[in-house]
Amino acid sequence: MSKPADPMGSDAAPVVRLDGITKRFGDVVALHEVSLQVWRGELMTLLGPSGCGKTTLLNLVAGFLAPDVGEIAIDGERVTELPTYRREIGMTFQNYALFPHMSVASNIGYGLRARRLDKKEIGRRVAAVLDLVKLTGLEDRKPRHLSGGQQQRVALARALVVRPKVLLLDEPFSALDRNLRGAMQVELREIQRKLDVTTIFVTHDQSEALSLSDRIAVMAEGSIRQLGTPDDIYRRPADRFVASFVGDVNVLRARLERGDGATATVMLSDTRVKVPGVPLGGTAPGSAVDLFVRPEDLCVAADGADVVFHGAVAAQVYQGGHVDLYVDAAGIGSPRVLLRIPGQAAMARWPVGTRVGLALATEEAVAFPVRAII
């Protein structure tokens, strides 16, 4: 079997390779035959709801757990039975796991002291990584005297200072407020690109995954449901679970008119919509299908435009750069439809109670058979 194409644009072997990983906890199958390759310098995100197996997979790469079946390799070396300290990984945890009695510098240098590097080398590396994470001048403080964002930077610095082959991040921003989380996401991405360090990032936050990742592995029930770029995952979901889990979406009742393999045509009221044909493979023409449409791909119909359906504005939610309009409609499969309209003019133009006609603003949509179960 030939090697899959490297999405990072090189012919090198993957830095992390998981082959047929299965992990059980008693009668519970946490992971079932999971295979994944992560390339050099790539930021791979494991995205999914609680209990999907993403943290278990991260812990297997780290060596905190051993697979029941399957093999793990890092940088071409089989590490399935190797202990954590021999895998050349760096890891940050949800709670940062800083030593409260140690200073910032001592926390960061802990892994280097464990590796018995000389003091000068430890001091040089700690100073360099302090500068990298913008903590120079705080090296003598204890963790309790740091903000949440500063503590997160210390944890990241401690993982990076050992110069890992793979950086593992287990929901590192979950304890931060929204604004700080956004700032730290930007900083992490800048550091990751600067160091070109191969990174596996675990999160349940879809927006975080979409903004940070080179590729995303969407997980559910112990398996990878789809692996692709953020745009692939958002615009071309492979199944109903991925389409529903990643981002907001409207599910509208339509009918399959015809399909020719790569492309299919469905009828939404009297409007023909082109959709990917693969998800509808085996569906007979005339069958009811669910059409998944993103909020930004619907609009209030202009005069003379084709109206897909009518409804009444039920609620407005001002979001700064855009307004979410919730429209009550009947006969389309979803009793309430969400539109995402740029700017704030929608607040005055379509107040609650206004009757509106809705149209498709783009041809971005995907359909799945009604019989499918999320």
Image (tube, grey):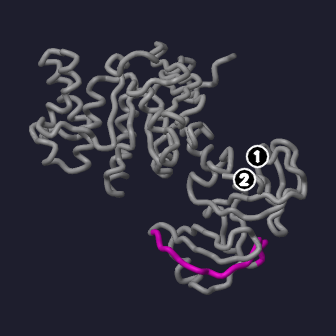
* Mark-to-mark CA distance, 2 and 1: 8 Å
Q: Quadrant of residue 199?
A: top left
Residue displayed at 75% across by 74% down: 309
Q: Taken as a whole, is the magenta stretch helix, strand or loop? A: strand
Per the image, label 2 sits on a secondary structure element best described as strand
Q: Nearer the viewer, residue 345 or 34?
A: 34
Relative depth, front residue between 77 and 197 = 77
The three-letter amino acid code for the residue at tag 1 is Pro
Residue 214: x and y, percent? 51, 37
- Please rate how many residues cluster around mark 2, counting C-alpha atoms within 10 Å: few if below 14, some from 14 to 19, many from 20: many
Q: Quadrant of residue 341?
A: bottom right
Question: In the rendered structure, which amino acid carries the disc numbered 2?
Answer: Val
Residue at x-position 58% and y-position 27%: 35
Image side of residue 262 versus residue 205, left or right? right
Q: Is residue 74 above or below residue 157?
A: above
Residue ID at (45%, 45%): 203
Disc nearest the viewer among 2 and 1? 1
Q: Secondary structure at mark 1?
A: helix
Taking the view exactly as shown, the residue that stands out farthest to the top is 77
Is residue 347 placed above or below 281 in the rendered structure?
below
Residue range (magenta): 304-319
Residue 130: x, y in percent? 20, 34
Residue where numbered disc 1 is placed: 279
Q: Quadrant of residue 286?
A: bottom right
Query: Residue 46's x, y, as percent?
Result: 50, 39
Residue holding disc 2: 366
